[in-house]
Image (cartoon, helix red, strand yellow):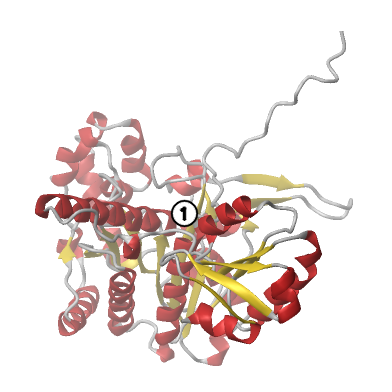
Amino acid sequence: MSNTNKPRPTIKAVRGTRDLLPDQTPLWNKVEATARAVFARYGFGEIRTPIFESTELFARGVGEETDIVSKEMFTWEDRARAASEKAQSLTLRPESTAGVVRAYIEHKLGETGQLQKLYYIGPQFRRERPQRGRYRQFWQIGAEVLGPQTSGSDSPLRDAEVLEMLASLLDELGIRDWKLELNSVGNTEDRARYNIALKEALAPVKHLMCPDNQRRAETNPLRVLDSKDEADQEIINALPKIADYLGPDSSSHFSQVLAALDACGVPYHLNPRLVRGLDYYTRTTFEFTVTTGLGTQNAMLGGGRYDGLSEMLGGPKAPGIGFAIGEDRLILTLQAQNEADIKAAQEAGAATGAGAPDLSHLEIGVPKLDAYIAPLGVAQNPAALKLARDLRAQGLTIEVGDGSFKIGKSFGFADAIARNIILLGEDEVASDTATVKTFATGEQVKIERSQISNRLKS
């Protein structure tokens, strides 16, 4: 029996990835437009780097013992195209800071002598276990500030300015109840002293910890502080605090960061366990957490200073500080806040007996078009398209139906996607007029074609 008519199985998005559909992307676009506007006010310019890089970039920059490099990267061997070429190990970027610093070095941006303030918006890739707000392809909004020391790149003021900018961005986006958590992980010398103290403190208790933390205790003890393993928290909380091992320079730098934040009125909470998950961080490290939408894993964004990263990648000395916002997680927070606002408004209306409240200002989704043009016959299709062209040229959002549709079908389509319907029949085309109906009020008028634009804009 032939299987030629057997339906083929459908192909779905790979686990840990997803499609963003037109009813979802308006909120994403709004977030990104707000970020671009805020970054522009602070003098940042956009940089776009490749989504894959040499694996060595992340091994050297992020750290071979980090979970990202040791467990989570999508890596493959790019086979040589000619006998004289060597195969190269390539990796989909798991984060963007290393790529931005690579571009800074490659294009000799430091030779300008100017402070480089760069931002990016784009996808990253990690082989993580998919969960709420965490995907194998995820989106980040990030920024980096770096340059030669003579540009002021190592100033505590740069750290405070980045944090103040983030506070402003979250406020403009409408993120409520955010909390800035801050720490200093010191410079290279401070961390060396602290690592020794950590190893000594971990030696008698590491066998009681999970396998990952047992490994970290040997290879990179600072990573133990970043552990989320519930069973190990009591041991971790009893470990020495890095603040007790900071040298005078690091202590002074951190104090100046805090003083600048105090002057700007940006609230913060000191968290001695905050070390972040990447090896390149020095001195200031930070996270912004939220109370809505993300559950117990409530960090929305994080970052820190990386004064030695450029040298690690073979470049000149270029102190820097940067951050990355998990855009997927930011969107979840905004949606959760919106749902809570709608519920509160409905409950308030029910409690006062005021009936169903107007919640249109809380709607998130595709905005309705200005008008839907419904030709009342196939012969009116060309005139409908011409009218649509003219109205779109004046900045209006227009959809065009088809003269083969029955009038009821046209009204159904129009009501779903537009604020108005424009009826175009033989009489309207002959007299250069149109009939416009506004769905919200039910008002219907026949007006001259030259008046349609003003009518729709009013």
**Image coordinates for residue 198, horizontal then vertical, percent:** 23, 49
Left or right of 252 in this view: 395: right
Residue 397 picture quarter: bottom right
Q: Quadrant of the N terminus?
A: top right
Taking depth in this image into account, of 122 and 53 the one nearest to the observer is: 122
Q: What residue is disc 1 on?
A: 63
Looking at the rendered structure, the secondary structure element under dot 1 is helix
The furthest residue to the top:
1
**Image coordinates for residue 229, horizontal then vertical, percent:** 27, 37
Vertical side of 393 occupied by 102: above or below: above
Left or right of 180 in this view: 165: right
Q: Amino acid at mark 1?
A: Gly
Q: Is residue 99 visible?
A: yes
Q: Residue at x 79, y 60 (%)?
A: 378
Residue 253 picture quarter: bottom left
Q: Residue at x 22, y 41 (%)?
A: 202
Taking depth in this image into account, of 141 and 340 the one nearest to the observer is: 340
Taking depth in this image into account, of 219 and 43 the one nearest to the observer is: 43
